[in-house]
Amino acid sequence: MLADDPLGEALHFLRVTGSFYCRSELTAPWGLAMPDWPDCLWFHIVTTGRLHLDVGSETRVLQAGDLALVPHGQGHALRSEPGAITPDVMGLEHEFRNRYAVLRHGGGGAATTLVCGAVRLDHPAVHHIVGVLPDVIHVEPSGGLQAEWMQSTLRLIAAEAASLRPGGEAVITRLSDILVIQTLRGWIETDPAAQRGWLGALRDRQIGRAISLVHRDPARDWTVAALANELAMSRSAFSARFTELVEEPAMHYVTRWRMQVARTWLAEDGATVSEVAGRLGYQSEAAFSRAFKRTVGMSPGAARRC
């Protein structure tokens, strides 16, 4: 049975894949330059102290208990104070522990401790969600049940980072992943920008259901008429409303979704081009390859090697 909440269904499938996690023990003056990793989402959790976060021309001051996301993976700087030198964080000496690193850096003054990371979000829906996010999402302590839950999680991360008991690294990384997803959910539920485009379309009773149908069964021989029929709408009314809300024609969306799913299967499942073509309902590998290259900008074979 199709879910009554297409937005919730899309968020349900988001999965975090950690690329880099680091606990930093910093003393003023200090600065860190975080590299530009376009496919990743950076997060910074301040467990003690304070810092300045510079992303482009924007500066945020983060206090203990704050969390900041840099969703587009762009390079940015963290520093104890304006003007502090920011060496490349990857060029500093770390103590590596499997997927987790410990960094100690600075001039010996006031202390700040952080839990930072760069993660990837795995699901074709990610391209739609991340594309509409701002350059920085800053979560500060505030009222409400969600804020209380997040602050409790942040306090637990801070306690684990301070003591690092056996298994503490696993606790920190998994709680960090949950916080990333929860922060995205909170932004989507409250920010006016999330009411437009693809995210806004998911909230529409009819168009949201059409999107869910495509997501659940991308291999089906979808046409505008078939989707309109599922919604008991006229073909013309459905086509116009879909284009208005999603900001692209329905069949363009169907093809693009299929190719995003295909790219995931090729890269992560190890499926062959022929297998993916068949799973998506294409009658020939050549037809699938042409559609893939036209949409993604590279051949399926090249995507499989990425």
Image (cartoon, grey):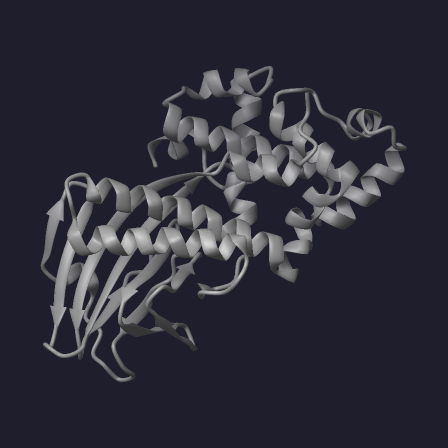
Seen from the viewer's position, the closer of residues 24 and 302 is: 24
Q: Quadrant of residue 281?
A: top right
Q: Is residue 45 above or below residue 122?
A: below
Q: Is residue 24 above or below residue 63?
A: above
Q: Which residue sits at x=61%, y=60%?
A: 191
Q: Which residue sits at x=49%, y=65%?
A: 142
Residue 105 spot, x, y in % from top left: 13, 68
Residue 294 spot, x, y in % from top left: 56, 38
Seen from the viewer's position, the closer of residues 97 and 282 is: 97
Quadrant the C terminus occupies: top left
Seen from the viewer's position, the closer of residues 216 and 79 is: 79
Q: Which residue sits at x=71%, y=50%?
A: 247
Give the left or right position of residue 69, taking residue 254 as reference.
left
Q: Quadrant of residue 24?
A: bottom left
Q: Is residue 30 above or below residue 126?
A: below
Q: Quadrant of residue 29?
A: bottom left
Is residue 217 visible to the viewer in this orientation of the structure?
Answer: yes
